[in-house]
Image (spheres, helix red, strand yellow):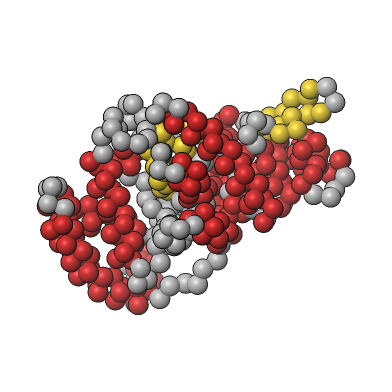
Amino acid sequence: MTDTAVIADACAPSTAHAIGTEAATTVAGALKALADPLRLRMLSAIATDPRGESCVCDLADLAEVSQPTVSHHLKVLKETGMLLSERRGTWVWYRIAPGKQRAVAALLDAFAPAAAVTEEPEDAAARAEALLQMDARVTRLAEELADELTGLNRDLVIAIVRESYAGLVRSAKLTVHMIPLTERFARQRLADLTRDRTTGVPQVLFVCVQNAGRSQLAAAIVNQLADGRVVARSAGSTPASDVHPHVRSLLTELEGAQEPGTAFPKPLTDDAVRAADVVVTMGCGDVCPIIPGVRYEDWAVGDPALASPEGVEAIRQDIEGRVRGLLATLTSKA
């Protein structure tokens, strides 16, 4: 074999796992149709409308454009198969097609927030060095918690601490706060692991994709309004590195006398679901395990990470209204 052939064989990438031509053409067509800011806003408004559908008269308020322009954009979205429409009297109503709900959720709840946030690239060498130094501190934390929590199996405590650190460090920025965050998360997991749902105050778990916006806000509102009668926690199927700035300012306002800055994105665990009386999903798809005896609700709520200041306030009010309804069902049994 010639040297040229050897080099060609060594450099030739394998394309066997690349997306197929037919699928790529379909996806590219959908993305092209969505490549317009107003269309994306329309799709988001329809997907998060509490009624499960939106009237064309509502969508016209999104931008100062003519009615024919609004109708054109909706027609393009409908041609992708993502929307269904129904005329009722004067107006046409739009909803997400059942077969496209997962695709729309993935676009609005995972891709869009990640694409909208830009972060400075992290120095890989510096991160690796910091991780090496952090390992010893995690080991020390695990030993200290095992010494403190004598009522629990020592090996279990150590394992939970290490798993908690591993779950957080995958997405979180490596900072001096990593050890305190690991301790908080580990203590929460250990409490969830040992909780008996038949006793104590009701517990609600809010789950979204990044645990950086809606779920954090909903949990904070519950903890403020319930005044200890209900406990709320939150988690994400794919946690972000930090809580979104729009939401962090609201959390600071809601925390009041509580210790500020305690909110941080956390990965979803089976223990958290098992410990909850109610699990509220907020655009995380079907990632939540189904546990017998746990009540599930799905809230279609806009993402504050992508909203304007006015939109963030509207989302907060929407969540607060839903929270009050949820609390009424939980506290009326007390």
Q: Residue at x 25, y 74 (%)?
A: 133
Q: Residue at x 22, y 69 (%)?
A: 137
Tell me the quarter of the picture where residue 89 sits: top right
Residue 152, x across and y down, in percent: 14, 47
The residue nearer to you, when weighing 288 against 17, is: 288
Residue 178, x across and y down, in percent: 33, 66
Q: Residue at x 65, y 44 (%)?
A: 44
Q: Is residue 224 above or below residue 329?
A: below
Which quarter of the rendering shows the C terminus?
Answer: top left
Residue 284 visible to the viewer: no
Tell me the quarter of the picture where residue 241 sits: bottom left
Q: In the rendered view, does 226 fall on the left or right side of 70?
A: left
The residue nearer to you, when weighing 92 against 301, is: 301
Q: Residue at x 23, y 57 (%)?
A: 162
Numbered disc total? 0
Q: In the rendered view, does 240 fall on the left or right side of 105?
A: left
Give the residue at the far top of this rendering. Answer: 89
Residue 263, x across and y down, in percent: 43, 57
Which quarter of the rendering shows the N terminus?
Answer: bottom left
Residue 152 visible to the viewer: yes
Residue 102, x across and y down, in percent: 53, 37
Q: In the rendered view, does 47 fall on the left or right side of 233?
A: right
Q: Is residue 116 above or below residue 174?
A: above
